[in-house]
């Protein structure tokens, strides 16, 4: 077992670039993302060769790095989604935007949101109350309701669509007592 030469590393790159790229492309369906992940994989591969020059099966090691890189990508993507629940943030923003057109400075955003939630079908209201008021993640909501994650996401999406329609039908001042 000997350290790989620059030529051997170049040969590995040439032989496996397309396969690694396709591996990422078919999983992300994004050309840019696949290019970034492929580049990251080969960069990490070269770093590992410098750190540990005599790897028994470099091709196998390369695919292991690709797998690890994709898993890290998924973890980072999940964390981004978990930190910023865009749909709920959009709902809150649409309520705030709607409120700006009315002169109700004493209006409490949460009570207005609850006013809209009370006009939703029970299942939709239940999911949004857990997401907005209790600030639970979709996974926590699914666990609390003994439902699967797809149920929660679909119900939340429908509820937010209904809320947008309700904002148009019922201006905020009709919800404030």
Image (cartoon, rainbow, N blue to C red):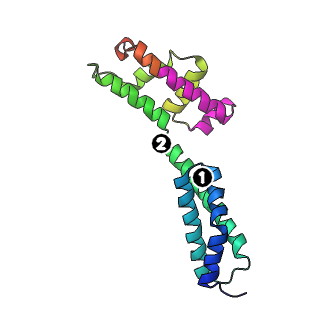
Q: Residue at x 65, y 36 (%)?
A: 149
Cα distance in 3D space between marks 1 and 2: 16 Å
Q: Position of residue 139 (x, y in %)?
A: 62, 39
Corner quadrant of residue 40: bottom right
Q: Position of residue 164 (x, y in %)?
A: 45, 22
Q: Is residue 113 left or right of residue 173?
A: right
Quadrant in which the C terminus appears: top left
Q: Residue at x 51, y 48 (%)?
A: 80
Q: Does the magenta stretch include residue 21?
A: no
Mark 1 secondary-structure assignment: helix
Within 10 Å of the Cα at label 1, are there few (<14), some (14-19), or many (20+) other Cα atoms? few
Q: Is the residue 38 above or below the residue 107 in the image?
A: below
Mark 2 secondary-structure assignment: loop
Q: Nearer the viewer, mark 1 or mark 2?
A: 1
Q: Is residue 127 left or right of residue 100?
A: right
Q: Name the residue under label 2.
A: 84
> What is the chief secondary structure element of the magenta stretch?
helix
Q: Mark 1 points at which residue?
A: 74
Q: Which of marks 1 and 2 is nearer the N terminus?
A: 1
Within 10 Å of the Cα at label 2, are there few (<14), some (14-19), or many (20+) other Cα atoms? few
Q: In this view, does 62 lie to the left or right of 161?
A: right
Quadrant in which the N terminus appears: bottom right
Q: Which residue is drawn at 52% across and 54% down?
A: 32
Q: Is the residue 106 above or below the residue 58 in the image?
A: above
| Number of on-image labels | 2
Specify the segment rendered in magenta.
137-163
Q: Is the residue 10 above or below the residue 73 in the image?
A: below
Q: Where is residue 129 in the image (x, y as percent from the top left)?
A: 53, 27
Q: Does the magenta stretch include residue 157?
A: yes
Q: Residue at x 65, y 51 (%)?
A: 26
């Amino acid at each position: 077992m000997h350290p790989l030469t620059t030529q051997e590393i170049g040969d590995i790159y040439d032989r496996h670039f397309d396969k690694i790229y396709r591996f990422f492309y078919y999983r992300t369906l994004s050309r840019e993302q696949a290019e970034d992940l492929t580049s990251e994989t080969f960069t990490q591969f070269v770093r590992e060769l410098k750190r540990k020059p005599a790897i028994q099966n470099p091709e196998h090691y390369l695919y292991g790095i690709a797998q690890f890189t994709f898993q890290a990508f998924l973890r980072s993507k999940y964390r981004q989604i978990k930190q910023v629940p865009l749909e709920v943030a959009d709902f809150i923003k649409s309520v705030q935007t709607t409120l700006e057109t009315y002169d109700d400075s004493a209006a409490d955003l949460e009570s207005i949101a609850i006013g809209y939630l009370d006009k939703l079908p029970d299942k939709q209201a239940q999911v949004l109350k857990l997401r907005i008021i209790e600030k639970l993640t979709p996974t926590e909501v699914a666990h609390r309701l003994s439902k699967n994650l797809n149920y929660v996401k679909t119900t939340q999406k429908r509820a937010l669509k209904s809320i947008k329609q309700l904002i148009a039908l019922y201006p905020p001042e009709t919800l404030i007592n």
